[in-house]
Amino acid sequence: MSSYAPSKKVKAWIEALRLRTLPLAASGVIIAAGIATLYGHFSWTLFILMLLMALCMQVLSNFADEYGDLASGLDDESRVGPIRALQRGDITRDEMNKALKITSAISLGLVLLLVIASFTNTNPAGYIIFILLGLASIFAAIAYTIGPKPYGYIGLGDIASFLFFGIIAVIGGVYLFNHSLDLDVILPALGLGFPTIAVLNLNNMRDAADDKKKGKITIANKLGNHNARLYHAVLLIASIICFSAYLIIHNAITWWFIPMILCFALWMYTVSIVLKVKNLKRFDKLMKPTSVTTFLVAIFFSLSLISIA
């Protein structure tokens, strides 16, 4: 029995990490790195620090989501999705609370290291702005489901995911590399923000009826079953347009665009399933391919830019 318990605990923590969400978190860093390379400002030090910070923030968000959903009563026997480790008791609330504190501290440390590495002594305002952004990101990851009024329960989850894992991840990342911005950077930022919402929307469509009964408001249960599916399709189509437009503007339609098209086709295949599937549990199986495909789009997008740099 003693030899089994540690293995079970390790598996529970690996499950709580939600590894399938990490590629999506890394995508913004990869896109920012590709744009920075195009302008000749790429730095391995900054890239590694950004990547570590993005992954740590995502893990913090995952831990907070699990802790908050259980505390609020959303994770109970009526839950449509998989039963989580905290809900099963494989991880205790006290253990998750400690993990939240440790992950928050590591995230803050990475924010400070990243700001120091990016700005050195050249831009005091940059220090302040990006430290505040880092603190806001940590707060947003926790307050999504934890606190007196979790904003993830009042329909703001899509907007927060869009801002922090799309807009801020790309635009903030590019600025940390380049210390300047072109207006058209908004296109890949939007391009990443839309599928980030799409992944969350899959989760929310799966749980829409159960969430509504328990008082959790999401865009999915506000739109209703049919419109939430159309919303999902629009998000991914808009992303395709944004990524393609940026590459066209910069004359970066290289042969790397071919695997990007294949990824876009896979997105559209998942959309076709979303539009017609009747068993809502199928939405859960679409999260991983949507997340991984977004990660691949980010890689091929950046390789397109790198190839013309």
Image (cartoon, helix red, strand yellow):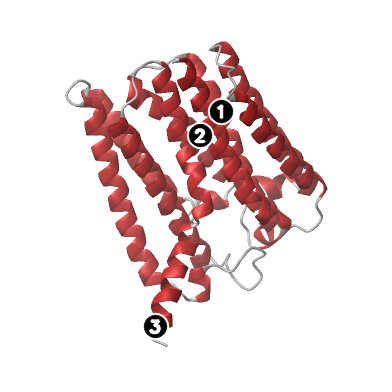
- Residue at image x 26%, y 28%? 118
Alpha carbon distance from label 1 to label 2? 6 Å
Q: Are marks 2 and 3 in contact (CB under 8 Å)?
A: no
Residue 229's image quarter?
A: top right
| Crowding at mark 2 (Cα within 10 Å: few <14, some 14-19, many 20+) | many
- Residue at image x 71%, y 59%? 281
The image quadrant where one finds the C terminus is: top left
Q: Above or below — where is 257 with respect to 282?
A: above
**Dot placed on the residue nearer the N-terminal end, 3 or 1:** 3
Under mark 2, the amino acid is Gly
- Whether residue 92 is visible here, answered yes or no, is no
| Crowding at mark 1 (Cα within 10 Å: few <14, some 14-19, many 20+) | many
Question: Mark 1 — residue?
Answer: 190
Alpha carbon distance from label 2 to label 3? 43 Å
Residue 140's image quarter?
A: top left
Question: Mark 2 — residue?
Answer: 166
Coordinates of residue 190 in the picture (x, y in percent): 56, 28
Question: Mark 3 — residue?
Answer: 3
Kindly report which numbered mark, 2 or 3, lies closer to the viewer in this rendering.
Answer: 3
238 with respect to 43 (left or right): right
**Dot placed on the residue nearer the N-terminal end, 2 or 3:** 3
Label 1 sits on a secondary structure element that is: helix
Coordinates of residue 187 in the picture (x, y in percent): 55, 22
- Residue at image x 57%, y 12%? 249
Under mark 1, the amino acid is Leu
- Residue at image x 51%, y 42%? 24
Q: Are marks 1 and 2 in contact (CB under 8 Å)?
A: yes
